[in-house]
Amino acid sequence: MAKVKTAKLGNKVFDVFVEPHDGYCTDPQTTTDPVVGVPYGLPCGSRRGAKKGMESLIHEMLHALNFSKTETRVDKEARQMTNLLWRLGYRRIGS
């Protein structure tokens, strides 16, 4: 697990980690050091998996902002946001 950044989401500062598995978020109301984890090796540009990686990051950020939302609701909202950003041409750049 490699800590890469911190991010302020809502009124909490989250440690952001890159992990070799699916994304996750700890409950900011019950954790003194909240964490957002994103999958290691997210593809860049239009490569296969890049859009899913973007959706995973948005999904975990939505949990961070409102941990009480259901998984179904977060899935739907993350997918909608990802689709809009993807259609607008947003992509992860880098290696």
Image: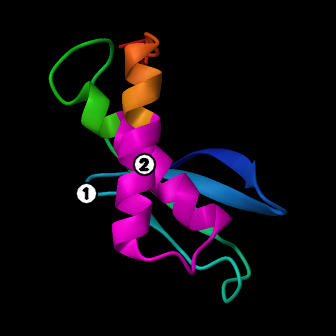
Tell me if mark 2 has few (under 14), some (14-19) or many (20+) residues whose alpha carbon lies within 10 angstroms of its own.
many
Compared to residue 8, the image places residue 83 above or below, namely above
Q: Which mark is residue 85?
A: none
Q: Position of residue 29 (x, y in %)?
A: 71, 84
Q: Residue at x 42, y 48 (%)?
A: 78
- Residue 13 in picture, x, y percent from top left: 77, 59
Magenta region, mostly helix, strand or loop?
A: helix
Quarter holding the C terminus?
Answer: top left
Identify which residue is drawn at 55% across, 58% down: 62
**Front in this rendered view, residue 42 or 83:** 83
Residue 78's label in the rendered image is 2
**Residue 24: quarter of image:** bottom left
The residue carrying mark 1 is 21
Residue 25 located left or right of residue 43: right
Place residue 63 in its image quadrant: bottom right
Q: Is residue 23 above or below residue 89?
A: below
> Which of the two residues, 3 or 36, is positioned nearer the viewer here?
36
Asked if residue 62 lies in the magenta stretch, the reply is yes
Q: Which residues are magenta?
A: 54-81
Q: Horizontal and vertical percent for residue 10?
A: 78, 59
Separation of residues labelled 2 and 1 (CA atoms): 18 Å
Q: Secondary structure at mark 2?
A: helix
**Dot 1 lies on which element?**
loop
Specify whether 73 is left or right of 40: right
Q: Earlier in the sequence, mark 2 or mark 1?
A: 1
**Is residue 27 shown to the viewer in this render?**
yes
Q: Nearer the viewer, residue 34 or 50?
A: 50
The image quadrant where one finds the N terminus is: bottom left
Residue type beneath disc 1:
His
Residue at 43% x, 77% y: name it. 70
Residue found at x 54% / y 75%: 26
Badge 1 crowding class, 10 Å Cα cut-off, few under 14, some 14 to 19, many 20 or more, is few
